[in-house]
Amino acid sequence: MNEHNSTSRLWRILSTLLLALALTACGSGNSSDDTAQTPEADIPPPSGAVCETTDDDPTSSECGQVLVSMTDAEGDFVRYAVDVRSLSLERRDGTMVEVLPRTTTVDFSQYVELSELVTAATVPVGNYVASTITLDFSAADIQVEVDGSAAPAQVVDASGAPVTEVTLDLQFDTLKPLSITPGVPASLTVDFNLAASHLVDTSVSPARAELHPVLTAALDPVEQKEFRIRGPLIHVDESDNSYRLALRPFYRQEGRFGGINIATTTETSWDINGESYTGATGLSALAEQSNGTATLAFGAYNAETQVFTAEIVYAGSSLPGGTLDAVHGHVVARSGDEVTLKGARLIRADGSVVFNDTLTLQLGESTRVRKSRYPMALLGTDSLSVGQRISALGTWDGERLDASEGAVRLRLTSVSATLNHSADAELEVTALAFGARGVDLFDFTGTGIDPDNDADPAHYQINLDGMNPGSLASGAPLRIRGFATPFGSAPADFDAVSVADYSNAAAQLLVSWAGEGSNSALTQLDANGLQLNLDPELLGTAHHLRRGGIRTDLLAMTEQPQIAPAFDRGVFALVQDGEVTMHGNFANFATDLGTRLDNGAQVKLLHGAGGYRDGQFNFMTMSVILRNL
C-alpha cells in the first residue's frame, strides 16, 4: 500500500474514532441512556419509499426528518472555506441517502461559538448506522494569521502532497444508531475539529497545514451551542407565536434544504427593515412581509421538544447581504468616522462572500447603530470602539463599505485574557486576543476620556455591571463576552455579560513527535496518569496548551503538566496499524498502551481535552486520543 492510501485509511480511522468518542460522550455504550434509544422493533421496516425534501414536513408514515447542523472546535485559522460535496447516511440495510442536495461552501472557522442548521432532510424511516462526507479542497480558501495578517495556507497530507478531496466514512455507535421515525425529527451535529485536524507551520511560505481530519458527528449532543438559521419566509402563525422558513444555509440563494418552524417569545428581539421590535409586535411586523422575505434567526434548540426558539430575528433589508452589502469583523482602529476592521468578511447583496481581512468602514451622522440583546436602544456612532465585533450594512464601492446611510450592529465580543486582580464590580485583566486575533493588532488610541486613559491591554478594565463571576484566581485564563465601551469613554474598557474560567474545562493539549513518532514519547505511564517526554529533539511542530484564544508553549513552562483522568470514566482511545481500540477508563487505557509501547509501537500525536490550572501543572483530562504508528 502506498503512503497516500495509507494516510487516507488513517484519516478514515481517526474520523470514525472521533465520531465514536462524540457519541459515547452523549450517552452511548453501556450507560443507562441506552434505554432511551428507539427499539428496532418499534421502527417500521424499510419500504424503499422515495422521501423528498421539500419546504413542508414529511407526511408519509414511511418518512422522517433529520436535522443536520455544522459547528467547529477552535483552531488556528482565520478562514477555512471548503466545499462540502456530499453528506450521506447509510441505513442498516445498506441503503445510502444523500441529505445535502448540492455542493455547499462552508467556512468552518466561523462556527466556533455557534452551530448552523444546514439541512432538514426528509429520509426513509429506519436505523442509520454510518455517514459519509466528502470535502473538496480544489477551490478551498484556507488562511492563517502570519505576523498579524491573514495569509494563504496550503493543505497537505502527511507526505506533503496537496490535498484535493477527502471522503470520510463515519461509523455510528452500534448501540445508538441514528433512528428516524415519523413525526420525531432526529438531530445530527457535524463538528470539524480544526485544532485537532491540523499541524500548522507558518515558518514557510505559503504556510502549510498538514491535515489529519478529526470530524465528529454527535446525535443530540449534550452541549448545545447557539444556533443560526437562515432562509426566506414561508408564513407566520401569530396564534402559535411562530413562523416558518425555507432553509437556505450559508448565504445560499436557492436549493431545497427543508422547511423549519421557528418559535418566538415575548423576549424575542426583532430587526425588520431597519425597525426594532420586541415580542409579539415583531412577529406581527413579520406577518406583514411578503412570502420570500429573507430571515435570519439566532437562538436555542431544545433537543427534548425538537423546538428552535429565536432570541434574535433579522428580516428584509436588516439582513446582512439582503438588499445592501454587508461586512462582519472586529474594529482594530478608529479615526473620526473612519473605522478599520480586521478579519472582515464582505457579503455582497447578490449573496457572494469575500474575505478581505482588512477593510475600511465609513460612518456618518445618519448611520443607525444598535446592540445585540438591546434592540430598542438606538445608539450613536461613538458606540463603535476598538476591539468591538460588528456587522454593518451599506454600499461597497470597491475600496470601503459606506455605511453613512446604512446601519451597524454591535455583536457580542469575546476577549481572551488572564486575570490580574478583581474587585466587587470590576476585573483587571491582561487582554491577549479579541476573537481569534492577537491584541497586538489593535490600536487603542482615542478609546479613553483622554490619552492617559486609553485602553491598555496589560491593564484592561472589565465592568461587571453587578454580575458575580464567582471566585477567580489571579492568573486564571478567562474568556469574557460582552461589548467594548463607547469610543472615547474608557475607563472601563469593556462591559461584560459573561465570564468563563478555562481552568476546569475547554482546554486543549496538542503534542506531536517528529518523523513517524517516538517509542519514548512518554516518561511515565500508569493508572493515575501519564507524563510526556518533551525533549525538543523528539518533538514535532505541535507542543502547546490552548485555552480559548490563549496558547502556551509547553516548552516554556517551568514544569511539564501531568495528564491525569478527571473522572473515573472517560473517553480514551488508541489507533495502531489500522485498528482503533477504545477504553472507558484510564487504567485499562494505560495498560493497553504500555503493552504496545513494550512491543515497539511509536507515538506520533496526542490530543487531549480537559482543564488546566496554572501553578498546579495538572491537565485533568476527559478524553485522550493517542495515535500510534
Image: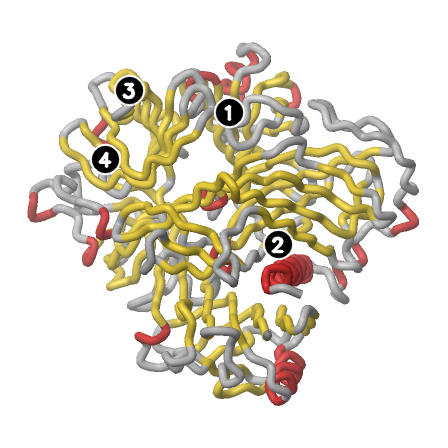
Q: Element at badge 1?
A: loop
Residue type at the position of mark 1: Gly
Per the model, the C-alpha gap separating discs 1 and 4 is 35 Å
Residue type at the position of mark 3: Asp
Marker disc for residue 216 = 2
Taking 12 as reference, is 378 above or below it?
above
Residue 180 placement, left or right of 491 = right
Q: Earlier in the sequence, mark 3 or mark 2?
A: 2
Q: Which residue is mark 3?
A: 397
Per the model, the C-alpha gap separating discs 4 and 3 is 16 Å
Q: Earlier in the sequence, mark 2 or mark 4?
A: 2
Residue type at the position of mark 4: Thr
Dividing the image into 4 quarters, which one contains the N terminus? bottom right
Q: Element at badge 3?
A: loop
| Residue at image coords 27%, 43% | 387
Q: Element at badge 4?
A: strand
Residue 554: x and y in percent read 37, 73
**Pointer 3 local density, CA inside 10 Å: few below 14, some 14–19, many at least 20:** few
| Residue at image coords 64%, 49% | 167
Residue 265: x and y in percent read 55, 29
Front of the two marks 1 and 4: 4
Residue type at the position of mark 2: Thr
Q: Which residue is mark 1?
A: 279
| Residue at image coords 84%, 39% | 125
